[in-house]
Image: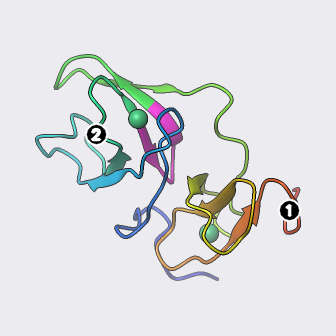
Amino acid sequence: MIVTSVDILGRHLKPLCSRDNRVMKYESGGSKANTGDRASYHCGVEGCSVRYSSTDGYYMLIGMPDHANPVAEPGVNTARCPIHGRWLYRRLNVDAGPGVGWSCGVEGCDYGHNANTKGDWVRS
Ligand SMILES: [Zn+2]
Ligand SMILES: [Zn+2]
């Protein structure tokens, strides 16, 4: 049994925006920049509404403050962590080589897979 709460989004991740390929920054829920009520990552590019959290994967936050609704970003979320069942995020590929690297958004989880090699792809 895993004791770590899987609902806590790691604060030290470097997910890439699915649209801009920019490193997204952590924004706690209810903060000025984050109109959603939960912590998520956001790239900060003007007009970009794409966010990432481990429970929702990549999604867009559409609407006004206090009435913002998460809308799924189609085709982006493709894999979940086999340990936590949380959505993986795209990350900078420093040591995994060419291709898109994906990692689990749960704090302390080191699961990851490379979209090109599918070496540690796990189907459930
Ligand atoms: Zn973006
Ligand atoms: Zn995980």
Q: Residues within 10 Å of mark 1 (few under 14, many from 20)?
A: few
Q: Residues within 10 Å of mark 2 (few under 14, many from 20)?
A: some
> Magenta region's main secondary structure?
strand
| Lateral position of residue 93 relative to residue 33, left or right | right
Q: Nearer the viewer, mark 1 or mark 2?
A: 2
Task: Identify the residue at image location x=36%, y=28%.
Answer: 49
Query: Can you identify the residue that label 1 sits on?
Result: 122
Task: Identify the residue at image location x=63%, y=66%.
Answer: 84
- Above or below: residue 18 compared with residue 109: above
Q: Is mark 2 within 8 Å of ligand 1?
A: yes
Residue 47, percent across and down? 30, 22
| Any part of residue 72 in sight | yes
Outermost front residue: 98
Question: Does the magenta-highlighted stretch encompass residue 46?
Answer: no
Q: Secondary structure at mark 2?
A: loop
The residue nearer to you, when weighing 107 against 14, is: 14
**The residue stretch that appears in magenta:** 51-59
Q: Secondary structure at mark 1?
A: loop
Q: Quadrant of residue 72?
A: top right
Residue 45, percent across and down? 31, 34
Outermost left residue: 32
Q: Which quadrant does ligand 1 occupy?
A: top left
- Above or below: residue 36 compared with residue 115: above
Q: Is mark 1 within 8 Å of ligand 2?
A: no
Q: Which mark is residue 44?
A: 2
Residue 26, percent across and down? 30, 56
Split into 4 quadrants, where in the image is the C terminus?
A: bottom right
What amino acid does circle 1 point to? Val
- Above or below: residue 31 compared with residue 70: below
